[in-house]
Image (spheres, helix red, strand yellow):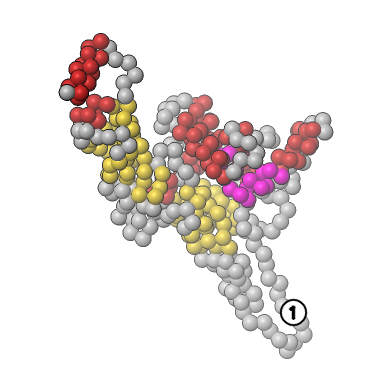
Amino acid sequence: MEYKDYYKILGVDKNADEKEIKKAYRKLAREHHPDVNPGNKEAEARFKEANEAYEVLGDAEKRQKYDRLGANWNAFQGAGRDPSGFDWSQWTAGGPGGPRVNMQYGDLNDLFGQGGGGFSEFFQSIFGGMGGQYGGAGAASGRAGAYQPRPARGQNVEHPIEITLEEAFNGALRVLSIDNRRIEVKIPAGVRTGSKVRVAGEGYPGAAGGGAGDLFLVVQVRPHPAFERKGDDLQTETPIGLYTALLGGEVIVTTLTGKATLNIPAGTQPGQTFRLRGQGMPHLREPSQRGNLLVKVQVRLPKQLNDRERQLFQELASLASE
C-alpha cells in the first residue's frame, strides 16, 4: 500500500497550524475545482487529493494518528529497509480494539461535490473505521440473594462527521456500520458546524438491564471554495467590468441552487455588497425559510486601451477636472 504525504499534497509544513492548513486547502480547492476545470482529469485528481489531505490534517484526532504513522514510516525507510515490508497492521482501522463506528457514504460524490470521488486505499485502510469505541459493562454475579445493582442507562457517544456545504444545504444520508449492523442516518438541511444529529440507542450499553445511551454525530461543515457561511447567510464575490460598474447592468451569479441574475446599479463602487434574498442556507428548524446570499463585487479595470478608448478616457478626465 502506498504511503500518502498529506503535508506535501497541501504544500504546508508539518508544524503548520489549523489556519495555515485551511488556507492551503481552500486555495487548492478553488484552483482545481471541477467547476473551474470541466473535463480536466488531472485537476479532478488534485481536487480529490486536496480533499482527502484536509480530511486528515483538518481533524485533530486523525492528524495525530497520521503523524505517528509518518514517524514510524520514515524511521523504517531511514533504516534502509524495503518499504513493502512495513507492518501496517497496528495502523489500519480494523486493527486491535473493541467494536467501532464506521462511517460510510450513500454516495461518495456527495462528499466532494460535482466531479468528486472516493477516498484512496491508504485513507480507507488507516482511517475508515475511526470512531467512538463501544465498551461493555460486565454483568454482576454472586451468590443468591446478593444485592442486585439498579439498572443504569449507558453513556452517550459522540462521533465526528464531516459534510460538504452542499450537503448542509440539501440534507444528506450517511450509512453507519455499528457492530456489523447498517443504520441509515439522515442529516437534516440547515445543519452547521457543531450541530449534533441524534441516533437513539446506539451509545454505550446500559448496566443491569438499563437502556443504551445515544450516539450523537457532531457535524463539521467542510470549507467551500466559493462561499463562506455566516449564520444562515452566505457570502461570495463576483467580478464585474468597469463599464458595468459605471453604467449599470446585469451579471450572472452562481448560487447553491444554480444561476441567479444580479442587477448592478450605475455608479457601483468596488467592494460594494448586494443581497440576494432567500439564496442562503435553509433554517435548521424551518427549511422552507432561507438566509440571504451577500455578493461583493470586484471591479475589473481594463489592462490595455486602444487609441480610441484612451482618447475617450482623456476626454472624460478633462470633463471631470472642469
Image vertical order of residue 112 relative to residue 231, above or below: above
Question: What percent of the width, then of the height, locates residue 297?
Answer: 31, 35
What residue is drawn where x is 61% and y is 54%? 131
Q: Nearer the viewer, residue 100 or 168?
A: 168
At mark 1, the secondary structure is: loop
**Residue 172 placement, left or right of 281:** right
- Position of the C terminus by quadrant: top left
Where does the magenta region start and end? 51-68
Can the viewer see residue 165?
yes
Q: Label 1 belongs to which residue?
A: 141
- Main SS of the magenta segment? helix
Q: Classify 201 as above or below 264.
A: below
Which residue of the protein is positioned furthest toward the top in this rendering? 307
User: What residue do we see at 27% from left, 44% from top?
Assistant: 276
State the residue at coordinates (67%, 64%): 135
Q: Position of residue 78 (x, y in %)?
A: 79, 33
Residue flagged by tag 1: what amino acid is it? Ser
- Give the quadrant of the N terminus: top right
Q: Nearer the viewer, residue 62 or 130?
A: 62
Residue 315 image offset from top left, x and y in percent: 19, 17
Q: Is residue 146 left or right of residue 31?
A: right
Give the farthest residue toward the front: 322
Looking at this view, is 185 or 301 the one in front?
Answer: 301
Pinpoint residue 318: horizontal percent, then vertical percent.
20, 19
Q: Is residue 163 magenta?
A: no
**Quadrant assignment, res 299:** top left
Q: Observer-nearest residue: 202 or 276?
A: 276
* Mark 1 surroundings within 10 Å by alpha-carbon count, few (fewer than 14), some (14 through 19), many (20 or more): few
The image quarter in which residue 264 lies: top left
